[in-house]
Amino acid sequence: MSIDLRISGGIVVTPSGPVAADLLIDDGRVAGIVGAGVAAPADRTIDATGRLVLPGMVDVHVHTREPGYEHKDDILTTSQQAAAGGVTTMFGMPNLNPPTVDVTTLRDVFDRYTASSIVDWNHNPAPTKFDDIVPMAEMGICAYKIYMVVDTGRTYPHPAGTGIHDHGHLLQIMDRIATTGKRFIVHPHDQALMDYIEGEVLARGENTPQGYASAYAAREGVIWDTAIDVVLRLAEASGCPVHIAHIQTRRSIDAVRRAKAAGVDVTCEVNHWAPFLSTWNDVETLGPYALSYWVPDDNRAAIWEGMRDGTIDIASSDHAPHTREEKEIGWTEMWSAHTGTPGIQYYYELMLDAVNRGELTLERAVDMVARIPAEKFGLAGVKGSLEVGADADIVIADPAHEWTITNDDVLSKIGWTPYDGRTISARIERTLVRGREVYADGVVVGKPGDGKLAAARAEGPAAHAAVAAGSAAEGN
């Protein structure tokens, strides 16, 4: 009796480290990791000689733009980029139209993923309707998401209904989320400080990319640091597991490090733009196309330190596509431009390039993109690692393939990437979701609806993996 697939000759990156071995896949799961001489007849074999065989990325921070903003991207096009970028599970965000804030809007979004996604998925609703928090958990979500920010001069990308700004309200929400065992993703921001800081910048007439970048990084990132201090203290007070989005300052990283040492259940993420697209030169040459945010050099050094020592747990793309028209206005009216940058298609390869440059070990990079997000968001043993019994979510990459990213390769509707013209040293060749190829040799081959809900249970972290395993089994 044969198995479905054997991936032979590669370096398999397992939870215990890289090993020269063959990977066996059957019924959508990893069936074995064996030496080349071990007999195991397979219906199909992929030769991975000279290649890395990696777990697929679990990207917990993705803006699909559907429903409401499909002119930027939609679930299908985002999942196509995910497949090309080695992302096998993606979590969507609630800043949609209508925003995902209750059972009704969450059910609608789930139906859209079911029909369109070619990779596995989940979605992070905003817990702003108190009575819907527990029912949404029972639908299989892995996390919630809120913003502590109000947009100035625009209503997007942080629309009404997705924000919590009062600290008492924030603690009340954390108390309720703590009963579900889910993780609470927070976009930190001190709005009162930002109102003052950006008001001064705008009063000087600096409505430019440089003015915007300087405002958000002002006084060594005070708007981030004060907000994160509040979130960490409230997490300690409530027992709510929290996840800090957009970590980008030295003080914030130090605060997370101290909180972890004190036993607070906190994780944090670095988005693609922080280590790879946040220099002052990027701001001056790419302007609105580089913003997201400017990260001064000292803070960027702290980010790399935090990535290496494990303080920064997770690499998530914060994929945030906007059209050229929505960006171009930013050259002269940056506060009217839509901020955020596309990132899901190239983040894994940029991380592998960083490994080749000696910035990270391979094991650390894989932990950040795959193992740790799966573990911390309730999918341990199912997603994020190549181990027997886990879903066969696999990336095959050439670690010594130099190539140049161009806009011509972009699969997003927007048709551009801030990395256009950048040469990197590693390339993804194949992506498999539950043993099924969704990307091969430069072509997306997955079909809409191939992706399945990567579900977690409302009762708490201990039950997450078991339910996710059942969900994956039903999808095979």
Image (cartoon, rainbow, N blue to C red):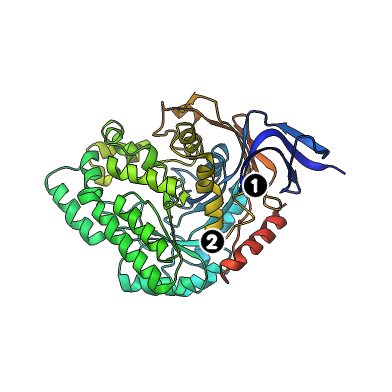
Q: Which mark is residue 386?
A: 1
Type of the residue with mark 2: Cys
- Residue drawn at point x = 45 percent, y = 40 percent: 343
Which of the two residues, 442 or 230, is positioned nearer the viewer here?
Answer: 230
Q: Residues within 10 Å of mark 1 (few under 14, many from 20)?
A: many
Q: Is residue 178 above or below residue 449?
A: below
Give the residue at mark 2: 142
User: What is the spatial separation of the Cα atoms under label 2 and label 1, in whole angstroms?
Assistant: 21 Å
Which percent across, then down, holds residue 39?
83, 38
Type of the residue with mark 1: Leu
Which percent across, then down, holds residue 121?
57, 52
Q: Residues within 10 Å of mark 2 (few under 14, many from 20)?
A: many
Q: Among all residues in the image, which is located at the extreme right?
A: 1
Drawn side of residue 171 relative to residue 92, left or right: left
- Residue drawn at point x = 33 percent, y = 60 percent: 228
Drawn side of residue 140 relative to residue 132, left or right: right
